[in-house]
Image (tube, rainbow, N blue to C red):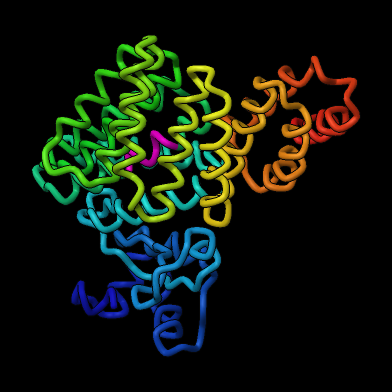
Amino acid sequence: MIMKEEGWHQARLAREMGVQTTWVSRVVTGQRDTPVGNAIALLGRVGYELVIRRKIDEVEVKRREFIASVATATFVPASNGNPYSNPEYVMLLSDRVEMGLYGSGGISTLEESARHLRRVRDSVADTKDVRLLGAASQLARQVSRVQYDARKLPQAQESGKISAILARQAKDDSGQSDALNELSSFYSYGQDGYHGERWARQALSVPGISPWQEAQGFVSLGRALGLLREKRHSYAALEKAQEIGSELPEFERARLTGNVGVAFYDQGDWGKSIAAFQEAVRLIIPTSPLLGANYMARQVQAALNAGLPYVAAELMNTLSCVAPLVSSARLDGYLGEIMALSSPYREVPEVRIMRQQLRTLLT
């Protein structure tokens, strides 16, 4: 394929790759194969990148099934030898980062995803290609989520701002709204209601947003207003979000419900937060162990805050089975907080067992 696209003979391809012409001849005629690692190195010498992606003609599968689905190796030609200037390649990277995050957590993909973002930023510095800018924005947004899950909050906020800027340059209203909502979430997580409200209102002001984005914007606004002690306005925004989100697909509805639970938790409304987290876990645990484990941990926290140690202990039994499947600094932080919250109940037999499970998970 490379010889045909470049107009090369076997001798030219061999010279560019730094191998013998006889080796190329044997590979072309099927007499010899090469390990994947060697293939990646050789392809890199002639400006190509090896990428794994799901077959296009397969039916849509849930994220967890996607990880195990049949994959196809394809060659993505790189412009000027730089694959990061190829919008399709950058989109594939974004999908890969997202898959790793929702499958196993942010810690496992933190370093790799940040490296990809640095390289993409260099590639888009002077570009006018709106497809590349849009793809780069999406990658930056996924990287910001990874950094947030790894509890690298300043980095997540910076990547979120990059995503919003790139989306605006690409004239991508949808991507801009998503990035602004993520920013609001990151600042609210850091207990900064002022900036949380600012980014949420900007997200809601973007024209032509989807029902998911509108619902998420109201959740972000409700959470920020709660931090600013504007409880009545906060609850109105959260109610609006749930009304809009009632017809969303299951995965989006689960994320929205979980975020509503977080907003109620921040305001000390333990009953509402427990109910929201319970529904979010029910919807999402088969699809994303990461989000399911995090929402379940928040549910345990809410139960302990509400003075329900037996409920917390029962939930912890399930969480102890799910938590080892993911690698999340955010989840580790929640588990540490559960240990502290459960201390007053440590003489209760069920809680004593729960704390032993926590120690195992934390070590």
Indicate whether 252 appears above or below 227: below
Location of the C terminus by quadrant is top right
Identified at 27% across, 51% down, the residue is 82
Identified at 45% across, 21% down, the residue is 189
Q: Quadrant of residue 29?
A: bottom left
Identified at 57% across, 51% down, the residue is 285
Q: Quadrant of residue 172?
A: top left
Is residue 286 toward the left or the right of residue 353 in the image? Answer: left
**Magenta span main SS:** helix
Residue 129 placed where, x, y %?
Answer: 11, 48
Q: Is residue 142 magenta?
A: yes
Identified at 11% across, 38% down, the residue is 207
Residue 4 placed where, x, y %?
Answer: 22, 79
> Can residue 65 be seen at all in this image of the molecule?
yes
Q: Quadrant of residue 338?
A: top right
The stretch of residues the image draws in magenta is 139-145
Q: Is residue 171 magenta?
A: no
Indicate whether 355 appears above or below 256: above
Q: How many numbered marks have been drawn onto this rendered protein structure?
A: 0
Residue 173 placed where, x, y %?
Answer: 15, 41
Residue 194 placed where, x, y %?
Answer: 31, 11
Is residue 277 toward the left or the right of residue 251 in the image? Answer: right
> Can residue 107 be seen at all in this image of the molecule?
no
Location of the N terminus by quadrant is bottom left
Query: Closer to the camera, 319 or 360?
Result: 319
